[in-house]
Amino acid sequence: MKINIISFNHRIINIILCFSLLLIFIGCKKSSNEFNIISNTNCYPPCWMNIIPGKTTKQEVLTLLKGNSLIDTNSIITFGEPWNSFNDVGVFSISSNIEGNIYFVNDIVVFLGFFGDLNISFSRAIEELGEPEYIVNIPMNIPNKTNEIFALIPKNGINFAYNTHDMGIKSKSEIIPENKITRVGFFDPSYFDYLLEAGTFSEGFLDSVQTKEYMVPWTGYGDIEEKYPPANIK
């Protein structure tokens, strides 16, 4: 009987250890996902995986993306024609939940963006990317009334954003640390006005002059309407 009890105890311990290792694996995988997109070791934002906005050519970008194990190489596409103010645009997928887009001017990358389930909170974005300089609040009515909240750090070539759609009452009405970021962008700081003119940080609704009118200096967390009034979209 004693042998059976010992054997039984060993099995219980093994099950606990296996379960613990599984949780550790899941946790590490989750952290790795955040690390690779936000805190990669190759270079510091606005550089990402050796892609440097303002310096890296289109051909170099394609080579780097195709050699990156995080990226589905079959998803890498460049349109090969002008769009908006850019002479070409590229798209790619990191997973089924994360997409990337790249804007080129004269075949040099000027903007590199990620959107989707990034698994990053507003506070984590601040920790990893820096304190916002400005907030731009863009109201939208498609499909329902919602707001896109852009946090901009022009001097560093960084932005991150989230949409209030499907959020709880508190998250929808306030910028709080727990709000989930759904977009991160890296850009050449010298092209900030160019990107504003293209509507990059206003969902295409505003030009550079109009966007600057609604760029409210960051004063911390709090009520969106009071601290960061929405832009007047006509």
Image (cartoon, rainbow, N blue to C red):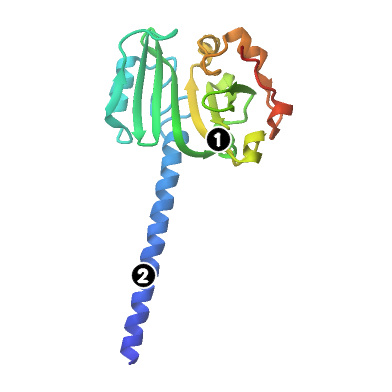
Q: Position of residue 97 (x, y in %)?
A: 39, 36
Provide the secondary structure element on which disc 1 rests: helix
Q: Can residue 164 be seen in the rendering of this structure? A: yes
Which residue matches tag 1?
125
Which residue matches tag 2?
15
Find the distance from the CA under tag 1 to the CA under tag 2: 37 Å
Q: Position of residue 100 (x, y in %)?
A: 39, 27
User: Which quarter of the picture shows residue 127?
Assistant: top right
Of all residues shown, which one is farthest toward the front?
Answer: 144
- Up-down relation of residue 44 to residue 25 (above or below): above
Report whether 184 appears left or right of 218: left
Report whether 202 appears left or right of 110: right
- Up-down relation of residue 109 to residue 64 (above or below): above
Q: Residues within 10 Å of mark 1 (few under 14, many from 20)?
A: many
Provide the secondary structure element on which disc 2 rests: helix
Q: Residue 230 versus residue 30: which sits nearer the camera? A: 230
Type of residue at label 2? Ile
The earlier-in-sequence mark between 1 and 2 is 2
Q: Residue 52 versus residue 21: which sits nearer the camera? A: 21
Of all residues shown, which one is farthest toward the bottom?
Answer: 1
Type of residue at label 1? Ala
Quarter of the image for the C terminus: give it. top right
